[in-house]
Image (cartoon, rainbow, N blue to C red):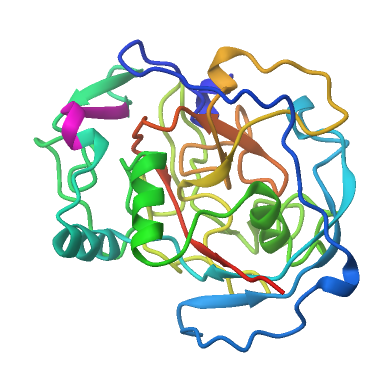
Amino acid sequence: MLILSSCLSVNDKKTISSDEKFYIIENINENDVVEEITEKYDANKMVFIKGGKFNFGSNTGLEREKPEREVVIQSFLIDKNLVTVEDFRRFVDESNYITEAEIFGNAIVYDDSVGTWQLIDGANWQYPLGKLKTIALDNHPVTQVSWNDALAYCKFCDKTLPSEVQWEYAASERGQKKNQLFYWGNDLIVNNQYMCNTWASGYPNAIGFQDDFKYTSPIAYYPANSLGIYDMAGNVWEWCYNWHLPYEGNSQVFPDELQGKAQRGGSFLCNPNYCHGFRLSARSATSPESSLFHVGFRCVKNITN
């Protein structure tokens, strides 16, 4: 069920789609890849990802992940961690920014007590489940921010949102792990430990979580990939810059619920019984003005030769 991957349609939220037919990837010549960065950056917060060649997409995944093809991308910097509640609060305090959920007066939450997705009045980045619920913790990823909110934060920090091809390249450790489901291997549980924040069982049945977290988990709680990037699977879906469109060579027309801005990485809602969003090639989408309790983001900084 696509709704589980955050692809849901709520009547109060309008889905906006692109006029483009395919997701176009800007291939570069391998000789133009920036080998090292000369610009100063905070190595405690960002990772330099050397560009190169890798196989993007998957021929064995869902239809919207096909076809797999070889691409060459430029080097870039990517945040080690998801943007936290504390990070976002600093941005709001310094810029007086008001999120779209605060303007609308509501945001999207899955209410497991009644088993439905709902627009909850008062839900926003500070109170992801609604004003009558607990406040968001500073060291957890910020949620209930729309694509527009996320991009505003990135621009404030002189960064942008990752494209899907950048996200998959970084998550798969520069393409080296594309022969497996996850960046750590093919099993969700290793040595009796969950490798990412995800429900053991759940929607639409009774929720079961065995990783200590019903909703979001603190950033960097689970192991990073070999590049030093955390939470590239589970915890929250991550907004990407591009529209969610078929890859070149795929004639599929996405249904309305899959039109919007792309998202990657899966969330705490995902469960192998109904959602494999934490796979390296898995993708989802939501309209750019929508805010959801299981969607966050991280930033990148592009490098030009």
Magenta highlight on residue 108? yes
Q: Residue furthest front?
A: 305
Q: Residue at x 51, y 88 (%)?
A: 40
In the image shown, does 195 or 121 lie closer to the viewer?
A: 121
Residue 248 position in % (x across, y down): 83, 33
Q: Tell me the residue at 72%/24% (across/down).
A: 21
Which residue is located at x 51 percent, y 65 percent? Answer: 222
Q: Is 234 situated above or below 120?
A: below
Taking the spot 31% from the left edge, 27% from the top edge, the residue there is 108
- Residue 239 appears in the figure: yes
In reply to whether residue 237 is colored magenta, the answer given is: no
| Residue 95, x across and y down, in percent | 19, 59
Residue 19 in which image quadrant? top right
The percent coordinates of residue 94 (x first, y second) are 17, 65
Q: Position of residue 297 (x, y in %)?
A: 45, 52
Q: In the rendered image, which quarter is residue 23 located in?
A: top right
Task: Please indicate whether residue 227 sits to the left or right of residue 286 in the image.
Answer: right
Read off the magenta span.
Answer: 102-109
Of residues 179 and 170, the one drawn nearer to the viewer in this rendering: 170
- Residue 285 sits above or below residue 163 on the image: above
* Apparent side of residue 140 relative to residue 54 in the rendered image (left or right): left
Q: Quadrant of the N terminus?
A: top right
Residue furthest top as drawn: 11
- Regarding residue 123, the answer to whether it shows in the image is no
Q: Nearer the viewer, residue 202 or 147?
A: 147
Quarter of the C terminus within the rendering: bottom right
Count the numbered circles shown.
0
Q: Nearer the viewer, residue 65 or 212?
A: 65
